Amino acid sequence: MNEAEYDFKDRIAPILKRFPAIERPAVHVHFKRKLGWTISVLILYFVLSNIPLFGLSPDSIDLFAQYRAFFAGASGSLVLLGIGPIVTASIVLQLLVGADIIKLDLSNPRDQAIFQGTQKILVLVMIVLETLPQMVGANPYIKPDLSLGIDPTILWWALFIQIFIGGVLIMFLDEIVSKWGIGSGVGLFIVAGVAQALMTGVFNWERDQGMPIGLIPKWIWIAQNMGGSELLSGEGIKFLLIQGGVLALFTTIIIFLLVIFFESTRVEIPLAHSAVRGARGKFPVKLIYASVLPMILVRALQANIQMFGMIMARRGSTFLGVYDPQTGRPISGLMYYLDPIHSPYDWIPSLVHMNHPEIATWQIAVRLGCDLGMMIIGGMIFAIFWINTTNMGADAVARQIQRTGMQIPGFRRDPRILEKVLERYIPKVTILGGALVGLLVVLANMLGTLGHATGTGILLAVSIVYRLYEEIASEQMMEMHPMIRSFFGKE
């Protein structure tokens, strides 16, 4: 251990000991109790997301409106930031560890605890860094409501403290689910946010430009106000596909089916117990081995880049790009090319030119290429980071299999041999899966989704629910057969 590595661990350890934390259960938590904790946290999350920020002006602008579905926050509520600070802190720490700036061996339980504790401290830093830039300046995005007749400085501090408390509560709720519940809090909140967006996208009766927003009310309105001959014309079919939501419906269904297909596609490595004859099993290497959660990291990176560009533009510095004052979306400069594609209105030239005729077709093509490149390459890079920081790499998995007493039939019982076999599959499948998920996200966003849940949001929600179902099935099996729990080292 070199001096720099020792110095970091030595300095951070005393701080982490004093830092508030949710204790891990000392014994096995039964399935019903886990389910109870999970449901309780979910209810509390919905309660928090419906508590409005006291003193917030109606003129305030939601910087992360385009990312709401998978950032799991609610605009104008106590959980305004959602899981943004947690995800951003994870990106920063993974990059620092991956670049060996902070040297941690994540297969070591002590180093893993330091990693998790350091991430919590970074979350607090990110809450401040994501809140303050939106609140300072001559024309901030988060504004105090002066009509209340309260001193603006008091309102400013009241808003900041409320947002900070909301961010901290989300952090601890995530920790409760991870240690006492089923799955992770981040995943649970994403599913809740996406489900809410989908329900709104199907049943919302509010009107936008004279037509209801929800799919079912929209179809009722179309049936009442448009004739059959009008709908069967070329323009009518285009209207039904895009404005009518038919394309968004089909895209949402296709994403559901594709994610389930990807999750069920796997390479299975046969295993046999070294001491118990006849005890066999399989280690599945899924096509989406790193899960779709690394996509949150890529989108969070894009969201933070856009936040920086918007704040700079708000202060009069337009060297990074010019933003549309009505939509808050970039229409020129570097920020335009780095802005993710969200719907057909962002890449079909005729639809783009309806609102912004000054944007050239080649600029649209460059933007689309940048989004594809960032999602595919970013998906591969963060998928590799993800498996290394969650003990899913070949070396960590080899040691886990070794501890259970299992081995690959026909091979010596040696973790080094196991690691070599796993190295043939895990890195390649991780990179391929990350690229495929990135491509699928962009394609889904290009076609649009119900309720503006976005391709990333739908992808995350379906994958999280699928894996949650697998985890629940596994938990129930272990409850029925306690010996299985001890066999897999889950006391």
Image (spheres, helix red, strand yellow):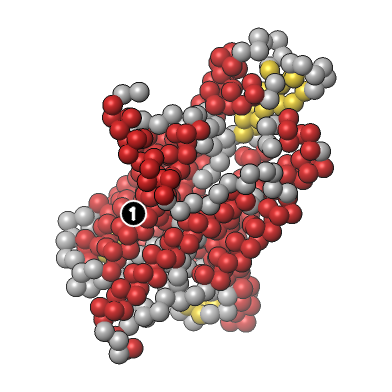
For residue 126, say whether it is visible: yes
Label 1, residues with CA under 10 Å away: few <14, some 14-19, many ≥20: few
Number of numbered discs present? Answer: 1
Q: Position of residue 29 (x, y in %)?
A: 69, 48
Residue beneath the point at 48% across and 62% down: 169
Side (left or right) of 483 relative to 421: right
The quadrant of the rendering that contains the C terminus is top right
Indicate the quadrant containing the N terminus: top left, top right, bottom left or bottom right: top left
Closer to the camera in the image, 389 or 268: 389
Residue at (38% x, 64% y) in the render: 164
Vertical arrangement, residue 364 with respect to residue 48, above or below: above
Q: Position of residue 380 (x, y in %)?
A: 45, 35
Residue 119 x, y percent position in the rendering? 41, 46
For disc 1, the marked residue is: 125
Residue 431: tell me if it is visible: no
Q: Is residue 73 above or below residue 320?
A: below
Residue 78 horizontal/vertical position (percent): 45, 70
In this view of the protein, which residue sits in the foreground, 232 or 82? 82
At mark 1, the secondary structure is: helix
Q: Quadrant of residue 324?
A: bottom left
Three-letter code, disc 1: Val
Q: Is residue 259 above or below residue 315?
A: above
Q: Residue at x 65, y 35 (%)?
A: 265
Residue in the image at 36% along x and 69% along y? 161
Quarter-wise, where is residue 203 in the image? bottom right
- 386 or 5, which lies in front? 5
Left or right, 377 with reference to 489: left
